[in-house]
Amino acid sequence: METKKFLDKALGSEGFYCVFAFRTSDDRRVQKFYDSIDALIEAAHNLDAEGYDAYFALATFEEAGSRKVDNVKELNTLFLDLDCGPSKDYASQEEAMKALRGFCQQFSLPNPLLVNSGRGVHVYWFLKQSVKLIEWLPVAERLKKLCADNNLLADPAVTADAARVLRVPYTHNHKTNPPSPVEFFGMGMPDPVDFDAFAELLGDDPIPVPSKYVPEGSSAVMDALMGNKENKFGDILRKTLAGKGCEQIKNLITNPAEVSEPMWRAGLSIAKFCVDSDKAAQVISKGHPDYNEHDTMRKMDLIKGPYLCTKFDEYSPDICKNCPHFGKIKSPIVLGQKIKEASEEDNVVELFPEGAPAKQYTIPAYPRPYFRGANGGVYTRTTNADGEVDEKVIYHNDIYVVRRIRDVELGEAIVMRLHLPRDGVREFTVPLTAVTSREEFRKCMAMEGVAVTKVDELMQYTTTWVNELQANTVAKDSHRQFGWSDDNFTSFILGDKQIFADRIEFNPPAPPTAGLFSAFEPKGTLEEWKETMAFYNAEDLELHQFVIGTSFGSPLMQFSPIHCMGLHIHGGSGVGKTTAMNAGLSVWGLPEDLLTDHKDTHNTRMHRGEVYHSLPLYMDELTNAKSWELSDLVYQLTGGRQRGRMASGSNTERHRGRPWRLLAVTSANSSMWEKISRAKAMPTAEAQRILEFDVKRRKFNTKIETDVLIERIPQNHTHAGIKYIQHIMNDLDGVKALIRKVQTRVDEQAGLTAENRFWSVGVTMTLTGLLIAKRIGLIDYDLKNLFNWSIELLKENKRNVNDMGASVEATLNDYIHEHWSNVLWIKSTDDLRKQNENGLDSLIVPEALPRGKLVARYETDLKRAYLVPKPLKAWCIDQQINYTAFVDNLRNSLGARKAKMRLSKGTHMNLPPTDVIIVDCAIGGDDIESLDGSSED
């Protein structure tokens, strides 16, 4: 068998591969990472040739450079290391392999692949598919325990070590003299095993993951499992009297006078740890000659734990051999063991996730035959063919289905809720297609942190939930966007909250929104948030107040036909642009998660716009954006839709959400208008959609006050937005009337017209949002002063746009100058009428000949241009100028006319006549630059 074939089976296909090598002669160690198995094999053989013992890591790793467990990506094997030789666990490899065969037969384990490590035996079971560490560890721990319990002397330090290294086949074990070859026992390749099926062969006893591999506190898993169990002596007695219980207990009860004192104490050890211990002690003790209630209870108090079957057999031999459970259980107390089912009070739980406030949940009753343990977890209770009750654990944490939803992309789906002791509650969506696919279901669970080996049983549990909900509930449409849920303002979606006018309900995650849910989890208090926002209640901070107002105004855009207006703030560093945007975002959520910056792509920003829907979209640091990117950004923002794109893997268009209606704020070090003007002659259309403000530096009293502000903003968020939006829903008519009133005043005071409609709506919604926020006590800014400031902002932007609008003469001038070397510069030929005696045109010496494609002729003495339409039209398109309108302006303003003429007239060039636009104009003023850079009068 080739090493490559072996490692392809032994290792996962994703992540980095690791080689570790050690050379005894000089105590040198080498550890290297590779992105291919071929590179790993080459490195191992090279190191082997240099006298190193070469090993490969059984896991692949997320990042190169670290072989620590927390960097493990996936594993594709379960493995053992059997040490052989003098003073080792096994005297020879033959003895070790014999023990392994017996172990595999005992538990019906599939045949593993065996490698001769030079002295010992390495054992591998290949998995059909790679698994994550969280799935692999419990099964590896169970295998390790099974080996220990059944006297298979595998090295316990190896079996459950996810970062373990073992020898590379066809290298050498240099610890022997001469070095021993590392090779396979036999040449056959066993079939890969199904991970879940293999795990079930190892038994279903829950095995705690060692604390060094998992976060502190995970040992609570075992505590919870044990806390769910209770022992009832009455059940032991009932089974015993029916011939299905413990023969020793039966002997204690039927022959009390013949039982020794140690044997009696053994019986009391079982009684003590049952819920009916007092009654059990009397049943065991009555009839015994030494029975005394006081002494019995005192003796029972001293017992540390239930005695094992081996101890019973030691005290009273020849009885256990007649027991149907002999060798199958460890203690008689197991016969009375049952799961304690949660009561209604138990199902009301309060979790204290780290870094977040406590939250209370009421866990619903699980569908039968499943039930919740008193300390959590999913269990099932059935009756076997003998009429005995069988109980077993499905999963040790609480996990259940919350509701059914319909999603435009996922189709029918379910929302599941997982309770984790340290992380709190995790809610996630699972497509129904995954619930019915074993492999897909396992992947979905593992991605959410559900480490489970009984995939089939958890699938069946989940399917039972689905059937129960289908019989009793109606599937709701998933909300793939935040903000207003419909055009009637019935509810507002904010993270996991669906906010109504009088209540808040749970909103399940959808694929586009799930990743942002945590950003909308309230933090701090409303009062602390208001104190933080009061920082901006000062003179010269009107811009910062206005930015915060856009956050309140954004949801009001739904009352308008305009999809979006933008505010672009620019200026140097340290003027508070980013901090103001963070303050605005804190109305709704955690700013650092909601603010986009220079690292985000255009598509990412537009995706956020679609997902935010009604929430403000703030984009920081657009300084490095290209001119054409900014122009696209403005048009797409104010258009309210993402670009249409094809769905991955299908010939269908990707689903786009409802058009957004929101306010946007962008920041950079320079003007957006000026930057766009580098790519097009007249960016007035963009300027009418974006207000601009040049932020001046303001000196604060101390640096400490700004540091405190920056620190407090992310510590208090979301509370204001919830209160604000519920107020709007409770006063829709009043809000609409207020918007109309504010807009009328804004338009009158600023002299706005239809072409300023974007500015009108954006400023109106911002000021209206601030008015509402002040009415309900969220802010206390001087809004009369801010209104006046806003009017001046509008007037200043109007002046700038009017200055920006290029005249037709200036535009024509720009065109000629950009194509200077493609213009024939020449004097006229006596009004194009004089000819010589041969009937030919008079030859004129050109002042400048075109160096490339001829786009125009300019007669310098008449100051008349002859423009070729095709290149002129192409230039207009590039500059985003309406060609037809421009030609009309040439005709109306400069008397331009269309005609046919030979552009090369008067020269040796013999070009045919062509269509031209004739315009009388002065290019470059009264003087024309000559080719040598001088000028002529």
Image (spheres, helix red, strand yellow):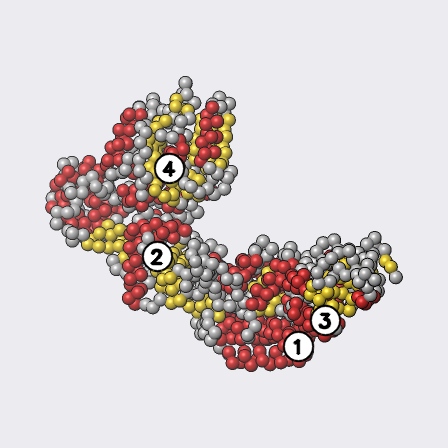
Q: What amino acid type is highlighted by mark number 2?
A: Thr
Residue 35 makes an appearance in the image: yes
Q: Residue at x 53, y 73 (%)?
A: 558
Cβ atoms at labels 3 and 4 below 8 Å apart: no
Q: Residue at x 32, y 51 (%)?
A: 438
In the image: residue 772, left or right of residue 681 = left
**Residue 166 appears in which quarter of the rendering?**
top left
Calculate the distance from the C-alpha at mark 1 to the C-alpha at mark 4. 72 Å
Cβ atoms at labels 3 and 1 below 8 Å apart: no
Instruction: Identify residue for label 1.
Output: 752
Point out residue 534 in the picture as x, y percentages from the top left corner. 62, 67
Point out residue 738 in the picture as x, y percentages from the top left corner. 57, 79
Cβ atoms at labels 2 and 3 below 8 Å apart: no
Instruction: Identify residue for label 3.
Output: 897
Label 3: state its secondary structure: strand
Instruction: Identify residue for label 4.
Output: 9
Label 1: state its secondary structure: loop
Calculate the distance from the C-alpha at mark 2 to the C-alpha at mark 1. 55 Å
Q: Earlier in the sequence, mark 3 or mark 1?
A: 1
Q: Earlier in the sequence, mark 3 or mark 4?
A: 4
Instruction: Identify residue for label 2.
Output: 433
Label 4: state its secondary structure: helix
Q: What amino acid type is highlighted by mark number 4?
A: Lys
Q: Residue at x 61, y 72 (%)?
A: 758
Task: Classify the position of the C terminus by image quarter.
Answer: bottom right
Q: Earlier in the sequence, mark 2 or mark 3?
A: 2
Residue 879 makes an appearance in the image: no
